[in-house]
Image: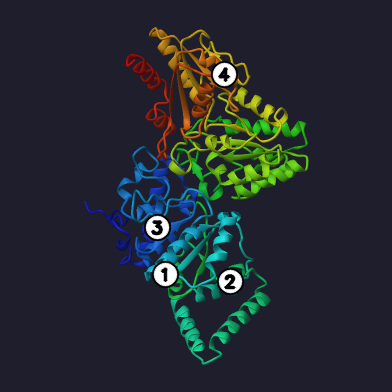
Amino acid sequence: MENNSILDKIKKPSDIKNLSEKELESLAAEIREKLIVTVSKTGGHLASNLGVVELTIALHRVFNSPYDKIVWDVGHQVYVHKLLTGRADRFDTIRQDGGLSGFPSPDESEHDTFFSGHSSTSVSAAYGIAQANKLKGDKHYAIAVIGDGAFTGGMVYEALNNAGRERSRLIVILNDNNMSISKNVGSFAKHLAVIKARPSYFRMKAKTEQMINKIPLVGVKLANCIFNAKTRLKKLFYKSSTMFEDLGFRYMGPIDGHNIPVLIDALEGAKSANYPILLHIKTVKGKGYNFAELEPSVFHGISQFDIDTGEFHSAGGSFSEEFGKLMCGFAEKDKRVCAVTAAMSLGTGLSEFEKNYKERFFDVGIAEEHAVTFCSGLAKGGMLPVFAVYSAFLQRGYDQIIHDAALQNLKVVFAIDRAGFVTGDGETHHGIFDVPFLNTIPGVIVFSPTTYSEMRNAFVRALYHTPAVAAVRMFKGKEPCLPDDFTPSLGEFDVYGEECSDIALVTYGRLFAAAAEAKNILQNKGINIKVVKLNMIKPIPLEAVSSASACSRIFFFEEGEKSGGCGEIFNMMLTENNYKGKFILKAIDDCFVRHATAEILLKKFGFDAESMCDFIAGEIENE
């Protein structure tokens, strides 16, 4: 049977170059169907990828990857790019263990230029590539594809300010799917934008500039005067932002980001220019799937769903949701309580807070550094700010935590979401570094609850019973099932098992559930063991160290980086107290963790109950 699928015939980007306009439209339709069907089964980022189908096709039609380098900001919209660069036959493995990454991965393909999972970095990276090309005499292009949301992050402006100073083969594509960067100046202005995007316009413009520049004595000055005069006229007539041109870029747009022929013309026009270009395109996030178009934020990063109804398969209930309810309760009783988020109100459970306490809800955009210092200012003014942030994104505010919060002993509370392994998103999104870097900052107190009740207690303590900066770490998902005979004390630590046991298993957070199960399995095998559960992990309670040091063997399991983690500090405290027994630490040892489900990763790193049992029993047998 003849295969009429165009997508199946695309084995490399150059296969797109000879397709007709009608075939390109058919290809776009096939890609949308592939995205919807696949992500409904695997979960992932849907709306953002549906919005860049035509743009990605046009990019690969005009440029020559991997020689021309495409840098995707954030990178979660790279699914279409993967389909067009020889990975369509493996696309159903995306975000799965051993499968394709949901983000650009240079280890996976030469067409993935730059690892990216955090926002606002693409212009800096692409500018660096463009400058490297210039230094080597390489005539290829560097293209940054950046969404309008990323323009809430300050790093973009630093890069634009730097990149616009000199000529280079740098093209920045602003994918505007929500926020209006500049005023709508009417249909005539849009028509002019399309005309100005054509290659012929740039060829004519380049020849004119060359002629003017060759005029003896006054050529260069005259060219600059013409450019400045043109800029002033645009401001006079359009009264719209020319920020990009003020920074040295030649601005093109806005143009329809779902019109492939217009996009191809615009990209060819951008190639014809011999200076940095900013191409502004307008797209619809979730394009082609009604549920995603209506609720693009909901269909941004998603779990498995039903295509016909748009309903998600995952059951409700999570630490994020419970945190959101808790914050509303705090805000109702205390008018000082403020919630701050960096474009993550939905993901961190703050939607209800946003509705009910608008005057005390602050979404600062993708600007974690600013968020931390802003919270410090709120605290200085007598408020009680809680910054809800994913662990992986808090990394960006490390300097501000030190300099603007901790150094000044200000009451800023960090609600750290997605602590530990995170399903699907991989290296850039696992929350495994916050404990080591928070451990380096004086005066910071960190809580790591296992249950909702422990989380509520931790936030009460963080807000009202700690002197300055405090953090509460929450893993993604529901609270785990714990043994019926375990009763949490809601203190700084708990001991599960006989205090007189000769073996101690020490852990915190999510791993306690596995540790408790492992303890009961080993006990049934005649191995007497107790679990020391740390509820406050910075500072580590001295009494917890004393409880563990009564045992001849201590096993510490930690779902985080070994270097600088709690396990290393626990061991140091044991040494300082002249502990003579054996201490064994099992943590993530000096590596970045690839994508898979959290369950698979917990088993892979030896953090599930069965692996804990095998590890402890094996160590005992080898003695």
Question: 184 or 64, which lies in front?
Answer: 64
Work out whether mark 1 precedes mark 3 in sequence or the reverse, and give the earlier one: 3
Q: Which mark is residue 28?
A: 3
Residue 526 in percent (x, y) is at: 39, 7
Cβ atoms under marks 4 and 3 closer than 8 Å: no
Residue 555 in percent (x, y) is at: 44, 20
Q: Which residue is mark 4?
A: 544
Q: Label 3 amino acid?
A: Ala
Provide the secondary structure element on which disc 2 rests.
helix
Residue at 70 percent across and 29 percent down: it is 466
Q: Which residue is mark 2?
A: 245
Cβ atoms under marks 2 and 4 closer than 8 Å: no
Q: Label 2 amino acid?
A: Glu
Q: CA distance from mark 2 to mark 4?
A: 61 Å
Q: Which mark is residue 134?
A: 1
Left or right of 241 in this view: 427: left
Cβ atoms under marks 1 and 4 closer than 8 Å: no
Q: CA distance from mark 1 to mark 3?
A: 34 Å
Question: 86 or 265, which lies in front?
Answer: 86
Work out whether mark 1 precedes mark 4 in sequence or the reverse, and give the earlier one: 1
Mark 1 or 4: the one toward you: 4
Q: Label 1 amino acid?
A: Lys
Q: Label 4 amino acid?
A: Ala
Left or right of 271 in this view: 121: right
Q: CA distance from mark 3 to mark 2?
A: 33 Å
The answer to whether residue 288 is seen in the rendering is: no
Mark 4 or 3: the one toward you: 4
Q: CA distance from mark 1 to mark 4?
A: 59 Å
Mark 3 or 2: the one toward you: 2
Provide the secondary structure element on which disc 3 rests.
helix
Residue 63 in percent (x, y) is at: 38, 66
Mark 2 or 4: the one toward you: 4
